Image (cartoon, rainbow, N blue to C red):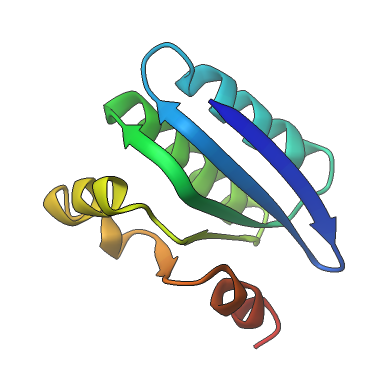
């Protein structure tokens, strides 16, 4: 798994690639929470290059969502790969997260 971060005015984009599973979900959670604790209030998580996510990865995203909401921020997911999108649909978690087909749409929603 690899995470690239880009801070913009009013939001931070984090692009995740690889597999998100038991072995690295803690790293994802830690990276996301560190960003929040360092002042990133609004996050866009771009997941176009995530080939696989398991329940521990989902748990990391839910924990991040909870922390962002405590701080009156936003967490938006963008460009879910087909496999990841299927997991979100099957688990009905798509109702918990704002999910966008394109990263640009998630960015535009930050300004709305």
Left or right: where does residue 43 sit relative to residue 102? right
- Residue 17 picture location, percent across and down: 52, 37
Q: 57 above or below 64?
A: above
On screen, residue 28 above or below 75? above
Residue 109 appears left or right of 34: left
Instruction: Kindly identify the residue that appears in the image at 19 percent across and 52 percent down.
Output: 86
Q: Which of the 4 image quarters holds residue 107?
A: bottom right
Q: Nearer the viewer, residue 46 or 28?
A: 46
Is residue 38 shown left or right of residue 15? right
Residue 22's quadrant in the figure? Answer: top left
Q: Point out residue 80 in the picture as x, y percentages from the top left corner.
A: 39, 56
In this view, the residue farthest toward the top is 23
Total numbered badges shown on the rendered structure: 0
Instruction: Give me the residue at 67% from left, 29% from top.
Output: 31
Q: Position of residue 82 (x, y in %)?
A: 27, 53
The image shows residue 70 at horizontal and vertical percentages of 60, 51
Name the residue rendered at 60%, 51% in the picture. Answer: 68
Residue found at x 34% / y 24%: 56
Task: State which quarter of the image contains the C terminus.
Answer: bottom right
Instruction: Establish if 43 lies above or below 36.
Output: below
**Side (left or right) of 81 relative to 106:** left
Image-quadrant location for residue 4: top right
Q: Nearer the viewer, residue 100 or 83?
A: 83
Looking at the picture, tell me which residue is in the foreground, 91 or 39. Answer: 91
- The residue most toward the bottom is 112
């Amino acid at each position: 798994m690899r995470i690239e971060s880009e801070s913009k005015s009013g939001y931070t984009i984090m692009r995740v690639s690889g597999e998100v599973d038991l072995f690295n979900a803690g790293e994802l959670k830690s990276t996301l929470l560190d960003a929040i604790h360092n002042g990133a209030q609004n996050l866009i998580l771009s997941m176009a290059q995530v080939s696989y996510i398991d329940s521990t990865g989902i748990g990391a995203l839910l924990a991040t969502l909870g922390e962002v909401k405590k701080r009156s921020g936003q967490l938006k997911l963008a460009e879910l790969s087909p496999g990841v999108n299927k997991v979100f649909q099957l688990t009905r978690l798509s109702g918990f997260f704002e999910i966008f087909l394109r990263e640009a749409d998630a960015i535009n929603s930050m300004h709305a």
